[in-house]
Image: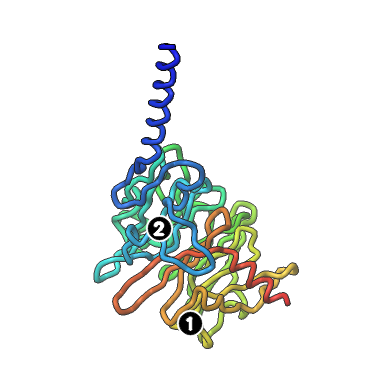
Amino acid sequence: MQTKWIIAIFIVIIFSAIGFAQKQSPCVLAGHPATSGQGESWRYMGKTPPGKAAELFAPEIIKHLAHSSPTFTPDGKEIYWSTTSGENETRKIYYTKYENNKWSPSIVAPFSGNYHDDHPFISYDGKNLFFASKRPKEPSGSQENDIWIADKIEQGWSEPKPINNFIGLWTPTVTRTRQGILTGQGTLYFLDIADGFKRNCGIFRSEFINGAYSTPELLPEQINQKDSLDWCPFIAADESYLIFSSDREGGYGSGDLYISFKEKNGNWRKAINMGAAINTDKQERFPGVSPDGKYLFFTRWHSEPNFHDLYWLDAGIINDLRNSEQK
């Protein structure tokens, strides 16, 4: 009888301890939301996924300073983004990493901080990180806009190199080559000078052929229009759609997100406004889609005060727009 009582008391103690542990708050990381590391809840900094209405993403971390969408490693455990701050809008690339069941504090990436760095994008295979920078190509050289690339190595990323030096790219225009993003096959979409267009810039495309990038082609009038600023491209991994920002007539504000779908014959359809679920009387720009294809990110710029806020919503809006266009 005494043995049975001892066993019963022992069982009560065990279940009480389990219940107490379940009630405890998970580790709260300074500046980051609490994450438990259980299941998939750790993804996206532990944030509750949005629905069809755009919601702020990590405002306590970004703090009105977003100057790009976040870009993710394929496993979702590293997130990079650029911020803008100060009178001269100095831009730096920050990152956070998920390890030991928590997100690290966001800090400036090791390859950023000394120059004007912007628009990071991690390739779909996770092997390369692209970003725009005004750093000099030579120690005593001038600071020029260009796309830079770093390789994924065991301990982070390699020393960045100008993309044309790294993979035989044509010599880019020195003042505007930026906002580079790749398809799953390595085709590069980017912003560069386009004479005769508003602010002399447009969205270009260059294929990776036989170990080098081809001469870039300006995307057609379905996307680039001479009387509008068309920029901030995001291309799908399979190149089936392109999202970009434009201030063309008929929009909601000073810049809206538009989407163009590619037809089976390779032609682009006329870009359409992505609608009131995203666009407002402010300026929406810097679109991006998470590696799992579930969420669409973008920034919204408020001129008064000078806020750059990061938003996200269910990426199902892309298929909704595709289906409505086909009707």
Q: Relative to 205, does residue 10 appear above or below in the rendering? A: above
Q: Residues within 10 Å of mark 2 (few under 14, many from 20)?
A: many
Q: Amino acid at mark 1?
A: Asp
Measured from the top left, where is residue 186 in percent x and y?
59, 55
Measured from the top left, where is residue 210 in percent x and y?
64, 53
Q: In the displayed structure, does residue 325 sit left or right of residue 302?
A: right
Q: Is residue 184 visible?
A: yes
Q: Amino acid at mark 2?
A: Trp
Identify the residue shown where x is 54% and y is 63%: 314
Q: Relative to 68, does residue 25 appear above or below in the rendering? A: above
Q: Residue placed farthest to the top in the image?
A: 2
Give residue 247's mark.
1
Identify the residue shown where x is 60% and y is 64%: 316
Measured from the top left, where is residue 11 in percent x and y?
43, 23
SS label for mark 2: strand
Identify the residue shown where x is 44% and y is 12%: 1
Give residue 181's mark.
none
Mark closer to the chain start, 1 or 2: 2
Q: Relative to 183, does residue 233 appear above or below in the rendering? A: below
In which quarter of the view is residue 20 placed? top left
Number of numbered discs overlaid on the protein picture: 2
Residue 278 or residue 8, whichever sits in front: 8
Identify the residue shown where x is 59% and y is 77%: 223
Q: Relative to 2, does residue 307 appear above or below in the rendering? A: below
